[in-house]
Amino acid sequence: MPDVKLSRVDTVLADLEYPITNEQAATELADVTLLLADGQRNLGDLVAKSGSDRFESTEDLQSELNNVLPREAVGEPYQSEGEG
């Protein structure tokens, strides 16, 4: 699979069949490189770090993914919550 920007990760997550276990999702996404504002990460590794055992939907998985991303990783201008 190609590299994917954080802003487009939902398109990759939508390709999975839900519900899906953490282990299944991590395996399915192991070959995806997530491009972040501060570099890149392996999407499967990030999913594996999630505290959830199971994901019910794309939104569920994306929410968990946001929880495991380092704060500086989401520094893209259109992802910003504003200047501090």
Image (spheres, rainbow, N blue to C red):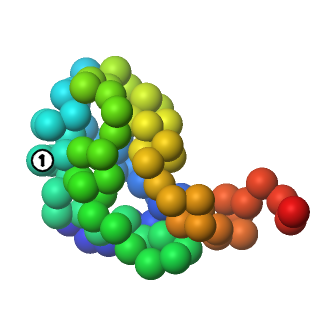
Q: On screen, 26 above or below 6?
A: above
Name the residue that disc number 1 marks. Answer: 27
**Is the C terminus in the top left, top right, bottom left or bottom right quadrant?**
bottom right
Q: On screen, 40 above or below 42?
A: below
The quadrant where residue 39 appears: bottom left
**Is the N terminus in the top left, top right, bottom left or bottom right quadrant?**
bottom left
Residue at 27% from the left image edge and 64% from the top image edge:
42
Residue 28 visible: yes
Q: On screen, 73 above or below 24?
A: below
x, y percent for residue 34: 37, 65
Residue at 24% from the left image edge and 45% from the top image edge:
48
x, y percent for residue 55: 32, 26
The quadrant where residue 81 appears: bottom right
Q: In screen coordinates, is 36 left or right of 31? A: right
Determine whether the residue tagged by mark 1 lies in a helix, strand or loop.
Answer: helix
Q: In screen coordinates, is 38 left or right of 9? A: right
x, y percent for residue 59: 47, 32
Residue at 24% from the left image edge and 55% from the top image edge:
45
What type is the residue that disc 1 sits on? Thr
Residue at 19% from the left image edge and 46% from the top image edge:
26
Which of 11/37 is in front? Answer: 37
Residue 58 visible: no
x, y percent for residue 64: 43, 37
The quadrant where residue 62 appears: top left
